Image (spheres, rainbow, N blue to C red):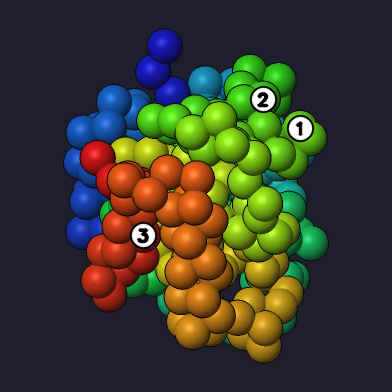
């Protein structure tokens, strides 16, 4: 059954672009162009909300709590604001995720997929598989070519994100946010940190299966599993 996404965005071009992008992925969409209109439209038929912060009248921050009270579904905030403290404040208000404008379409789609899966709860599989890699999300173990992978917490988390999005590019910002947490991204992680962890992860996989490359770099954007 198709999921329905409510787009609350006053920029008509961006709103229309999101309608097309999501429609191409099989989602149904409903659009609102102000916070007040978004609250009125929101209801039992909505599965996820994309919420712009800079809205006419009532801002995105003002309506997050009201949206959640009316019908609790994941809310992904869209904003050009990069401030980490602002992000933390939004999570406190009830936002489930945050995507910085301008965003890559692949990243937005991956985050939507992730939030819808998380909202489905137990429907998400305990064990993820890709080629001869097997990752267990419950006991935090992983195998490759029937050999145990000895991974650090960060390496395991990166591999999990890639395996949860096997057909999409995982952008650097998406990996930073999910692996190093929103609160610490600015201070604790940078491109070099991520490159080192990706390199180590590739080495671990090579030790198990020397003949296969699993992870490819999409230059300037991020990483994905090889198709």
* Marker disc for residue 126: 2
Position in image of residue 90 (x %, y %): 69, 65
Under circle 2, the secondary element is loop
Contact between marks 2 and 1 (CB within 8 A): the answer is yes
* The one of 113 and 150 positioned closer to us in this rendering: 150
Give the numbered dot on residue 223: 3
Q: Is 41 above or below relative to 93? A: above
Q: Nearer the viewer, residue 198 or 6?
A: 198
Q: Position of residue 101 (x, y in %)?
A: 39, 71
Question: Horizontal placement of 114 versus 167: left or right?
Answer: right
Q: Residue at x 76, y 32 (%)?
A: 138
- Of 1 and 134, nearer the camera is 134
Q: Earlier in the sequence, mark 3 or mark 1?
A: 1
Q: Secondary structure at mark 3?
A: strand
Residue 51 seen in render: no
Residue drawn where x is 29% and y is 26% of the image: 26
In percent of the image, x 27 and y 32: which residue is there?
A: 25
Q: Position of residue 103 (x, y in %)?
A: 35, 65
- Please report the residue visible at 49 percent of the width from the left and 33 percent of the height from the top: 145
Q: In the figure, is residue 218 to the left or right of 79?
A: left
């Amino acid at each position: 059954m198709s999921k329905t996404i409510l787009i609350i965005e006053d920029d008509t071009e961006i709103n229309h672009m999101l309608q097309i992008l999501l429609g191409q992925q099989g989602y149904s969409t409903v659009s609102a162009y102000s916070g007040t209109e978004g609250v009125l439209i929101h209801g039992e038929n909505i599965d996820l909300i994309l919420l712009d912060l800079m809205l006419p009248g009532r801002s995105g921050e003002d309506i997050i709590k009201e949206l959640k009270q009316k019908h609790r579904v994941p809310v992904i905030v869209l904003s050009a604001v990069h401030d980490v403290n602002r992000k933390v404040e939004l999570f406190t208000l009830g936002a489930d995720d945050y995507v910085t404008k301008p965003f890559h379409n692949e990243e937005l789609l991956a985050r939507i997929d992730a939030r819808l899966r998380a909202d489905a709860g137990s429907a998400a599989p305990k064990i993820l598989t890709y080629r001869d890699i097997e990752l267990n999300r419950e006991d935090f173990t992983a195998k490759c070519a029937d050999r145990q992978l000895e991974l650090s917490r960060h390496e395991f988390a990166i591999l999990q994100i890639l395996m949860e999005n096997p057909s999409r590019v995982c952008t650097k910002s998406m990996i930073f946010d999910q692996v190093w947490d929103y609160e610490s991204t600015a201070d604790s992680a940078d491109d070099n940190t991520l490159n080192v962890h990706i390199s180590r992860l590739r080495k671990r996989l090579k030790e198990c299966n020397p003949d296969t490359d699993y992870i490819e770099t999409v230059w300037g954007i991020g990483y994905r599993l090889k198709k």
